[in-house]
Amino acid sequence: MNRIAKMLLASMLAVGGGSVSASAADMVMVNYSDPGICAQPAVLNRITNRFSYQVRHVPNLPQVSIVDYYGIGESRHLPRIKDVRPIDRRYCFAKAQLSDGRTRDVWYLIEKPLGFAGIGSNVEFCVSGFDRWHVYGGRCRTVR
């Protein structure tokens, strides 16, 4: 939803001209130009470091590294709802420029609070063509 639509919706709700309701089962779709948490350097650095570890330790993967990210966005947000869904999940995507000159799709999931001892966040990611053992399903399905 773009900024103007958000302002119109907020002003309509402020004067009581409409009502918006959502149930706990509603999925919140996000598609706007601000990538938010998906573009935070800490998240991207974690993906870069774990990808580097992956290509070194999984047999028969090309020895490449992620050089840069672009086209970063958020595809889905499942907000935390107390007693129903205790974990906030944001599904993100990006294009990764690899050291061999190729570009690959990266799909990643940011979960809060799922860091060490429940503090911070957890990042799960899948780089297209590098999930050799299908940990994230066919074509990175579970983190899309």
Image (cartoon, helix red, strand yellow):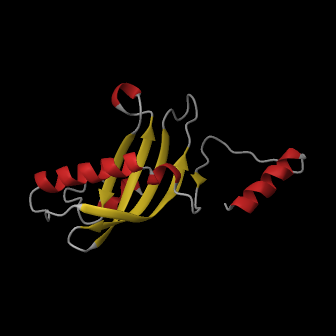
User: In this orientation, does residue 135 appear?
Assistant: no
Residue at left 35%, top 25%? 117
User: In this orientation, does residue 94 appear?
Assistant: yes
Along the viewing direction, whichever of 105 and 24 lies nearer the viewer: 105
27 to 98, vertically: above or below: above
112 to 105, vertically: above or below: above
What is the x, y in percent for residue 21? 74, 45
What is the x, y in percent for residue 16? 89, 46
Query: In which quadrant is the C terminus drawn?
Result: bottom left
What is the x, y in percent for residue 78? 54, 46
Q: Which residue is most to the left?
A: 59
Query: Which corner quadrant of the image does residue 132 belong to?
Result: bottom left
125 to 67, vertically: above or below: above
Report the number of numbered marks: 0
Q: Which residue is most to the bottom?
A: 101
Horizontal relation, residue 89 to residue 43: left or right: right
Horizontal relation, residue 66 to residue 5: left or right: left
Horizontal relation, residue 82 to residue 124: left or right: right
Residue at left 58%, top 34%? 81
Query: In which quadrant is the N terminus drawn?
Result: bottom right
What is the x, y in percent for residue 34? 56, 58
Residue at left 45%, top 54%? 39
Horizontal relation, residue 112 to residue 44: left or right: right
Residue at left 59%, top 61%? 32
Query: Which corner quadrant of the image does residue 52 belong to?
Result: bottom left
Query: Which corner quadrant of the image does residue 139 belong to?
Result: bottom left
